[in-house]
């Protein structure tokens, strides 16, 4: 049985004069210890997906419908007490910007120990010892001293390591990392990613990595979801998606990578911008930016269809496949 | 630590210098001191002679230096009315005022934190709306009107509290007599304290609410939720401490301002403090007393602000007092 099973998750935002749909019927599964990447441009709904999994959306966002089965229990239906037991304990989260994630007026020790004591019956000293062990695991030098320090006394990379240590404190089954390295120096990014990969593998922790960096996804994850305007448009094994992207949007994302361009040439970017939530075009949300768009694309939202290892939501891909089928039938 | 303290003390001295300069400049413009000192019958010749003796014909700088030199030795001149050293007159009145300010401060701290936190956590509840509505009323009504209304309702109509004076006080030390030792003293200080707090309390409720709401939107509060921390701990440990940092700074200034507000409160309640005394001194054109009052109030202002800055440094870990000013 999968660890996490999301079914038809729809998230809406109640704005002053209208309700906009931020996530539109998202479904995916995650096996125990599996690492999944969620990619897409800003505004695709990646972070909202991450926060929804913990039922942590703050107003005006809310889960409109759908199920989030975690270990067999629906997170959407949990009461506050069950949710508190889930958060930080069975499911941990790593936030985007370590500079603002830790509370500036509490010491590292206080912020680690409170997390342990919120979930386990431990004495302060026992909690402190666990915190020290976890800080060692993320290669923090002299952890005893760090516990007495305040966040502002530490560098960004150090803080993100501490946040990773906090995520691991209670040996969760799943870690959701929301762009964990975007706010960090490029040289430190690789270190942090490597550390996360190592810890997830050695502790058999599931990982959902939210990022816009396809390079990171290919190194870190086994499966990938590509999101666009609140929908999953392509899903499958990471290797397949990177090497043979089906959806025109995924193709565009991969072609836009600097590695795909000869030095001195312009980067091949996807024309246009992601639509705002209030102005999602009719039909396939990607159609105004897609060079293959047909009248069908402009009128009907494509279903996500499984083709072997990958699932794609694109009329054009469907047409190609049915042509192939017909040719095969003829032959 | 020492460098920071030294820096603060130097700043305080600079502020006191400016205050003394202003106070001294006022002195020269508040009527002729000779009119207060001598009768109508004294001739112009004798007046001039007295002027020379008193040094009133010297240059402004010479006069100021003499004034400052005396002030440094604790001599702020002699009150025309009381015929006593002005500083002594003020020091006798000071405890009453400080106790009143202390009472009001207790009320403000005791109520503003829970009310501010509550209205921030539950901004849409009916009680929050009532509190916010009342706070606007509190800010809008001047202190003297609040005070008179309170006397009318609680002293005249219901007779729950006495309407004037300090009541039974107990002598503690030096000039200090306290209201907080007897039940009668407590009864007397409640109404004036509430009246004095009536403007600052709503201000603080609103300030704490605004700060707290902002802090509750912060990433670290969201993160604390994601760690599964109990909401009460999030409100009172994670959020409140960050909320109070800016409030402390404003609070220090406001406590100083409250000493000035006592002029109105003390006058309405006939509270024998230095605010009441100041108003009488103005009526009597008791210049030395007015000047001494300005300097003493300025001094209290400077001292409270310095203390508040030090407390801020202790509470806020990102301000390292030990290393500051070095």
Image (cartoon, rainbow, N blue to C red):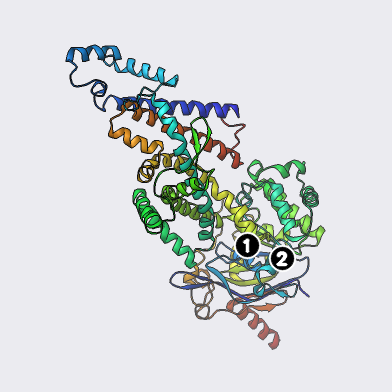
Which quadrant of the figure contains the C terminus of chain A?
bottom right
Q: Position of residue B135 (x, y in %)?
A: 42, 57
Q: Position of residue A193 (x, y in %)?
A: 71, 53
Q: Is residue A71 above or below residue B192?
A: below
* Residue B236 in which image quadrant: bottom right
Q: What residue sits right under mark 2 in the picture?
A: A85
What numbered label is drawn on residue A301?
none
- Closer to the N terminus: mark 2 or mark 1? 2
B153 sits left or right of A71 in the view: left
Q: Which mark lies nearer to you, 2 or 1?
A: 2
Q: Secondary structure at mark 1?
A: helix
Badge 2 vs badge 1, beta-carbon distance below 8 Å:
no
Q: Secondary structure at mark 2?
A: helix
Neighbor class of circle 2 (other Cα within 10 Å; few <14, some 14-19, many 20+) is: some
Give the residue furthest to the right.
A202
A19 sits left or right of B81 in the view: right
Q: Are callouts 2 and 1 both on one chain? A: yes
Which quadrant of the figure contains the N terminus of chain A?
bottom right
Separation of marks 2 and 1 at Cα, in angstroms: 39 Å
> Which residue is rendered at x = 44% and y = 34% of the image?
B94
Q: Position of residue B145 (x, y in %)?
A: 34, 51
> Which residue is rendered at x = 47% and y = 29% of the image?
B12
- The number of numbered discs placed on residues in the rendered structure image is 2
Q: Is residue B60 above or below residue B104?
A: above
In front of the other: A284 or B258: B258
> Which residue is rendered at x = 35% and y = 24% of the image?
B83
B162 sits left or right of A229 in the view: left
Q: What residue sits right under mark 1 in the picture?
A: A254
* Residue A76 in which image quadrant: bottom right
The answer for which chain carries disc 2 is A
């Amino acid at each position: 049985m999968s660890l996490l099973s999301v079914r038809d998750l729809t998230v809406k935002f109640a704005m002053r004069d209208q309700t906009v749909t931020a996530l539109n019927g998202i479904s995916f599964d995650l096996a125990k210890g599996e690492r999944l990447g969620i990619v897409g441009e800003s505004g695709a709904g990646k972070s909202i997906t991450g926060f929804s999994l913990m039922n942590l959306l703050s107003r005006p966002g809310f889960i409109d419908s759908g199920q989030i089965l975690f270990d067999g229990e629906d997170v959407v239906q949990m009461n506050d007490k069950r949710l508190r037991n889930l958060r930080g304990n069975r499911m941990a989260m790593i936030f985007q910007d370590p500079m603002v994630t830790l509370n500036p007026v509490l010491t590292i020790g206080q912020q680690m120990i409170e997390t342990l004591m919120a979930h386990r019956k431990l004495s302060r000293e026992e909690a402190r010892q666990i915190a020290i062990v976890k800080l060692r695991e993320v290669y923090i030098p002299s952890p005893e001293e760090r516990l007495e320090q305040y966040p502002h006394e530490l560098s960004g990379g150090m803080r993100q390591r501490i946040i990773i240590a906090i995520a691991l404190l209670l040996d969760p089954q799943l870690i959701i990392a929301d762009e964990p390295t975007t706010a960090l120096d490029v040289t430190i990014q690789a270190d942090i990613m490597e550390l996360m990969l190592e810890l997830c593998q050695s502790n058999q922790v599931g990982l959902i990595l939210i990022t816009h960096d396809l390079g990171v996804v290919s190194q870190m994850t086994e499966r990938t979801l590509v999101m666009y305007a609140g929908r999953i448009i392509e899903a499958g094994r990471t290797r397949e998606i990177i090497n043979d992207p089906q959806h025109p949007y995924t193709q565009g994302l991969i072609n836009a990578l600097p590695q795909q361009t000869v030095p001195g040439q312009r980067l091949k970017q996807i024309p246009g911008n992601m639509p705002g939530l209030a102005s999602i075009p009719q039909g396939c949300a990607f159609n105004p930016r897609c060079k293959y768009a047909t009248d069908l694309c402009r009128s009907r939202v494509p279903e996500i269809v499984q083709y072997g290892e990958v699932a794609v939501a694109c009329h054009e891909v469907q047409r190609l496949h049915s042509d192939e089928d017909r040719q095969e039938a003829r032959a | 630590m020492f460098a920071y303290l030294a820096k603060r003390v130097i700043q305080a001295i600079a502020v006191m210098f400016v205050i003394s300069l202003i106070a001294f400049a006022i002195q020269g413009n508040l009527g002729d001191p000779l009119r207060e000192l001598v009768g109508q019958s004294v001739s112009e010749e004798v007046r001039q002679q007295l002027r020379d003796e008193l040094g009133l014909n010297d240059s402004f700088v010479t006069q100021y230096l003499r004034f400052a030199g005396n002030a440094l030795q604790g001599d702020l001149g002699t009150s025309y009315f009381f015929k006593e050293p002005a500083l002594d007159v003020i020091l006798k009145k000071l405890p009453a005022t400080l106790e009143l300010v202390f009472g009001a401060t207790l009320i403000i701290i005791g109520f503003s934190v829970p009310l501010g936190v509550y209205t921030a956590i539950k901004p849409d509840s009916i009680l929050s709306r009532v509190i916010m509505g009342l706070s606007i009323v509190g800010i809008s009504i001047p202190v003297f009107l609040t005070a008179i209304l309170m006397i009318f309702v609680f002293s005249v109509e219901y007779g729950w509290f006495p309407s004037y004076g300090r009541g039974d006080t107990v002598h503690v030390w030096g000039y200090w007599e306290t209201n907080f030792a007897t039940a009668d003293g407590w009864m007397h200080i409640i109404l004036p304290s509430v009246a004095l707090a009536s403007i600052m309390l709503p201000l603080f409720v609103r300030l704490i609410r605004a700060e707290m709401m902002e802090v509750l939107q912060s990433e670290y509060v969201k993160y604390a939720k994601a760690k599964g921390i109990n909401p009460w701990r999030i409100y009172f440990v994670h959020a409140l401490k960050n909320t109070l940092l800016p409030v402390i700074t404003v609070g220090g200034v406001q406590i100083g301002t409250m000493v000035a507000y006592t002029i109105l409160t003390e006058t309405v309640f006939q509270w024998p403090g230095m605010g009441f005394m100041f108003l009488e001194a103005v009526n009597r054109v008791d210049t030395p007393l007015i000047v001494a009052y300005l300097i003493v109030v300025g001094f209290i202002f400077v001292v409270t602000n310095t203390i508040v800055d030090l407390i801020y440094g202790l509470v806020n870990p990102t301000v390292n007092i030990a290393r500051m000013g070095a």
